[in-house]
Amino acid sequence: MVKIGLLGLGTIGRGIVEIINERREYLKAATGVDLRIKTALVRDINKKRDVDLSDIILTDNFEDILGNEEIDILVEVTGDLESAYDYITRGLKAGKHIVTANKAVVSKYFEEISQLAAEKDLAFLYEASVGGGIPVLKPLREQLALNRIDQVQGILNGTCNYILTRMVNENKEYDEVLKIAQRLGYAEADPTADVKGHDTLRKLRILASLALQGKIQEEDIILYGISNISKLDVENIKKMDSTIKLIAEAKRVYNGFTAIVQPTIVKNNNYFANVNMAFNSISFTGNFVGELKFYGAGAGKDPTANAVLSDCLDIALNSYRKGNPLGKESLVNLNSELMGRYYLRISKASRDILERLEDMTKELLTDEQVIKNKKEGFDLAIITKLVKLSSLNDLIANLGLEKDQYFLAKIME
Ligand code: NAP
Ligand code: HSE
């Protein structure tokens, strides 16, 4: 029997208990592995929980799990950052394997925890931290042995993709759809992590570090979220026979890399345009295997719990890859070289702003009559020429706009 100490019994923790309750006997017959949750850690042991917890001891004291020598695997699904770090590192030092769905903790402490797990010859697995239910990290690790990976790209946040899909397809309001995504259990405890792009950035940090085998940290990634998107942007984008997705991308370029998370306008016939609702898709490109694409549920209780338990099963079957998966390539950050054509909408704009953008403007989307009638206070939307993102950013910074006054999206070529 393989015994689990479950840290957290919220959306994902509950899903894990439900799958084990339903599949334990089948799993035992099919694989010989008997997975059992021995103890579960929560903040409030008196909270009513809508799940069958027979045979599981509830505690609010981590020491009860750490000190229990019967427990082989700690499954961390608390969503907390610093206490999760404490649980994981102390767990490894106490000889326990670790499985987590917590991208915040993996992203912040990736090198340190990977090193510690390798030194202790224990598993540190985090498949559920990227792409929810999609098995992508395991195939990535496998392909790394043979390939040099040059690019990872994807839609990595279920909440953002759900919001954007429903705004575009059903003309829904941003706030309304965000609330539904929260109710469905897709969003983080603090949903600003989703809509401002931090969750996607953390997932890209994990994917990019593994794929490019260099230290690519959160601060190495340029970030734009979706929280400023308006109905006007959606209307403009639809007129371009396109839709909008939050896309994360890291690429090897010369002796370095670029890494960015940005709203991206994609033609309706593009592959990403058909990744909708809370689904995610991730692709990576190896020099021998070529491009591999992965698609599936990017968030939600059951798919994520399934990914967590797949990691547990790999540990129980001793079929996981051993050693530290992170490489030591020294890669220069070349984000200053990023270029593209961009959609830019500015609220409460003026003719002065329009003139200052003139050199970069390829196409004006705002009705010229509106500009003629109003000297200022109108919504301005343009498509830029092919420009350096850094130059466009400098110009935007010089316009003295408020942070929520504009929306910028790359146009995918
Ligand atoms: P959640 O619903 O907020 O549940 C968190 C659980 O952890 C609760 O049971 C809470 O206890 C417990 N907890 C929180 N802080 C704790 C602490 N410091 N010590 C002990 N227990 C603590 O979160 P969730 O949606 O299940 O997400 C869990 C993790 O999975 C997060 O890292 C999230 O990013 C990741 N994830 C989520 C999804 C998704 O679709 N939701 C998908 C992939 C990955 P109480 O119940 O007593 O409050
Ligand atoms: N909040 C995350 C999302 C959960 O919406 O993608 C899955 O990581």
Image (spheres, rainbow, N blue to C red):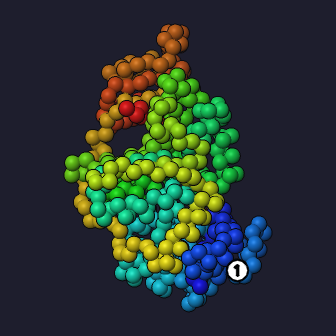
Is residue 247 or residue 199 the one in the foreground? Answer: 247
Q: Is residue 30 left or right of residue 118?
A: right
Which image quadrant is residue 411 in? Answer: top left
Circle 1 residue: 56
Residue located at (40% from left, 66% from top): 110
Ligand 1 visible in quadrant? bottom right
Is residue 206 or residue 321 the one in the foreground? Answer: 321
Residue located at (45% from left, 29% from top): 344
Q: Is residue 226 left or right of residue 119?
A: right
Is residue 230 or residue 271 the one in the foreground? Answer: 271
Residue 234 percent location from the top left of the image: 56, 29
Identify whether 184 is placed above or below 385.
below
Identify whether 118 is placed above or below 367.
below
Q: Secondary structure at mark 1?
A: loop
Query: Residue lying farthest front?
Result: 30
Quadrant into which the N terminus falls: bottom right
What amino acid type should be assigned to the residue bearing mark 1? Ile
Q: Residues within 10 Å of mark 1 (few under 14, many from 20)?
A: some
Label 1 CB sits under 8 Å from any ligand 1 atom: no
Q: Is residue 257 left or right of residue 275?
A: left
Quadrant into which the C terminus falls: top left
Identify whether 108 is placed above or below 376.
below
